[in-house]
Structure formats: structure tokens, C-alpha cells
Amino acid sequence: MRDRALQIGISPCPNDVFAFHGLMSGAVKMPGIQLVFAIHDVEELNRRFARGEWDASKVSFFAALGMTRECVVLRAGSALGFGVGPLLLARRNAQPLEEARVLCPGERTTAHFLLRTFHQEVRRIEHTVFSAIMPELERGTADYGVCIHEGRFTYERHGLTLVEDLGQTWETHTRSPLPLGGILARRTLTPEVMRALDDAIQRSIDHARAHPDETLIAMRSHARELDDDVIRAHVDLYVNNETRDLGTVGERALFAFEARARSAGFMPRETPALEVRQ
């Protein structure tokens, strides 16, 4: 009998490639299931998964708040923690923040949620693919940008200044790790398939940890910043215990995130709560 195909969306960022390399390379199998991967920028994943594409996908947790009726958060594959937040960066001689053009990596991203939450004075927010933000700041076509992913480690090379670590601001206000994004699965999948997919992602993470050199080659082929030290630092920061299994720490972080979004009016009262696969 032919294997069932599941379509999965992930980002090209080192933490996602690290977590899924075992499955993408075929070194790790999901019995009875053929996984078909699509690799896109996180905001592209947010948009297309919301439109109904793919069976499961990496999604910003801010975007996930609008998909609670249709989707469940898987236990494996998330990015959250302390010290992982987006950075608000500025070019030299930037205008005051309330008058400036500020770039974000997407309307549905957690980075955008944090900027709107902690900087309500900002009036000109424009969205572009995350990899274009630092180049635009360097060229002086924007004054500020919210930087995610590898840019945390390289912004000084581009002559940019750190204005604020938005993740640190989140941690100060909430005393909770920051949930960035996770793997959402559609409720059309059976509980057995969701459980098997969680197990497969965990085994893929274990494979990556056991074969770091092989996994590094795969990460290089997708990374925006090709410096091996930057790639390794990215994985060390964004792949942690909660990536393998959200656990109690991860679940509490998600509930704190949801509560903050509801109280700020980003999530209508009638919207069901986020559900983590049990």
C-alpha cells in the first residue's frame, strides 16, 4: 500500500533546518507517512497556512492565535525561551521612533505583536521579508527595523545600533519565556497521526544532535548568514529542551502569551484558547 503524504511547511532558518533535517534527508522515517516539505519565510508560512495550505506548518505564535479553531500546537518543533526575542535596531542618525518608518518581518509575526505591544507610539509600520530589513537600514531607506533570526548575531557588522531587545522587555513584564513560533497541525489529522508526527520530529532533533557536521551542511544551504559560528550560535539559542517537547514551561509560556494578547485586544473574547496536543 502506498504511504500517505503529509505536507509540512518550515522556514529556512537554522533552527528549523536543524530540527527537520533528519526527516528531510530520509535518515529519520515516519512509518506509513511520506512527508513533503515546503520551505518559506515565516510570514509566507503564516499567510499560506492560514489560507489552508499544508497539513502542518511552522507558524508564528501571534498568527496561531487566529487559527485556534482549525489547529492544534504540536509538542515538538517550537522556538521559545529566554534571550530569544526580536531586536529593535536603528540606523545611524535615525529620527525619533514615533516619526520614523519602522520595518517588521510580517503582520502576523510575534515580532510585530511585541512592537505594537510595547511601542504604541509607532505610527509607520511597514512589513517586508526579514532578510531585507537590515540591508534597508544600512541603505538609510528606513530608520528602524525589528530583526529576527540570525540577525541577532550580526547586526553590528552592518553598522546598526541596538535600541531594545523586545524579548527582554517581554521577559521583564511577564517573567515568562517568549513564545516565537511552533508547529501547528490541522484538526483534520487524527490524534494518532499528530502523535506520530510529534514523535518523528523529536527523533529528527535527536538525529541532528547526534550528527552535527552532517546537519551543519544542510543548514548552510539555507541560511541567510553563512558563517558557521553564527549558524551554531543560532541553533544553541533557539533549539532547547522546549523545542523537543514544550513541557510545562512551554505550555505556561503559551498561556501567558495568549492572556497578554487577549487583554491587549489582539484576540477576540469568543476565540477559543490555544490547544497543545496532549
Image (cartoon, rainbow, N blue to C red):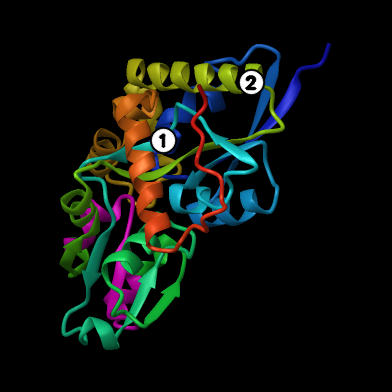
Quadrant of the rendered structure where residue 35 is? top right
* Left or right: residue 107 compared with residue 166: right
Q: How much space separates mark 1 and mark 2, taking CA atoms?
A: 19 Å
Q: Residue furthest right?
A: 1
Tell me where residue 220 appears, x and y as whole percent. Answer: 39, 40
* Left or right: residue 144 compared with residue 109: left
* Left or right: residue 253 compared with residue 132: left
Quadrant of the rendered structure where residue 94 is? bottom left
* Range shown magenta: 134-156
Asked if the stretch drawn in magenta spans residue 114, the answer is no
**Which of pointers 1 and 2 lies earlier in the amino acid sequence?**
1
Which residue is disc 1 drawn over?
78
Which residue is disc 2 drawn over?
191
Please name whichever residue, 173 or 229, is drawn nearer the observer in this view of the structure: 173
Q: Residue furthest front?
A: 269
Instruction: Identify which residue is drawn at 17% across, 80% down.
Output: 92
Please name whichever residue, 214 or 62, is drawn nearer the observer in this view of the structure: 62
Label 1, secondary structure: give it. loop
Label 2, secondary structure: give it. helix
Asked if the stretch drawn in magenta spans residue 152, the answer is yes
- Name the disc covering residue 257, or none: none
Tell me where residue 62 appears, x and y as whole percent. Answer: 45, 53
* Left or right: residue 17 compared with residue 156: right
Q: Amino acid at mark 2?
A: Pro
Q: Amino acid at mark 1?
A: Ser
Tell me where residue 188 appears, x and y as whole percent. Answer: 72, 32
How many other residues sit within 10 Å of disc 2, few (<14), some (14-19) or many (≥20)? few
Residue mark closest to the camera, 1 vs 2: 2
